């Protein structure tokens, strides 16, 4: 499916489970490739591997986030408290 896709979204979990390299290798050069999710490192290094958009989370209030995590709060329950959702785009796209 991936080699025929025009738009490909890969979660940052693929980096954690070791499948990212294989998935990126399947992406055609003409497609729009994005890596997204709370586990996605916000780094322009992705652009060197064919990624066009990177979306992730930046912690803006570490104390609050540590407190929420210690209470067992899941990401969906944070609702923007102490974090900012960001997207960076490859300039040449």
Image (spheres, rainbow, N blue to C red):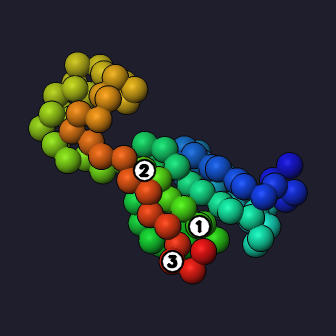
Q: CA distance from mark 1 to mark 2?
A: 14 Å
Residue 26 in view: yes
Q: Which mark is residue 52?
A: 1
| Alpha carbons under labels 3 and 2: distance apart | 18 Å
First-in-chain label (3 vs 2): 2
Q: Residues within 10 Å of mark 1 (few under 14, many from 20)?
A: many
Image depth: mark 3 or mark 2 in front: 3
In depth, the one of 70 and 7 nearer the eye is: 7
- Quarter of the view holding residue 5: bottom right
Residue at position x 37%, y 30% from top? 75
Place of residue 18 in the rendered image (x, y in percent of width and height, measured from the top left): 61, 51
Rendered location of residue 4, percent (x, y): 87, 57
Residue at image mark 3: 91
The residue sitting at 36% across, 47% down in the picture is: 85
In the image, what residue occupies the spot 26% across and 28% down? 69
Residue 15 position (above or below residue 67): below
- Asked whether the residues under the numbered discs 3 and 2 touch, taking CB atoms below 8 Å apart as contact, a structural biologist would say no
For label 2, the residue is 56
Q: Secondary structure at mark 1?
A: loop
**Numbered disc total:** 3
């Amino acid at each position: 499916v991936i080699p025929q896709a025009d738009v490909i979204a890969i979660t940052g979990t693929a980096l954690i489970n070791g499948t990212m390299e294989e998935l990126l290798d399947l992406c055609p050069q003409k497609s729009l490739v994005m890596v997204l999710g709370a586990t996605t490192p916000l780094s322009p290094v992705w652009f060197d591997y064919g990624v066009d958009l990177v979306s992730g989370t930046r912690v803006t209030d570490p104390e609050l986030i540590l407190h929420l995590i210690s209470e067992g709060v899941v990401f969906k329950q944070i609702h923007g408290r102490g974090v900012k959702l960001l997207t960076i785009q490859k300039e040449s796209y």
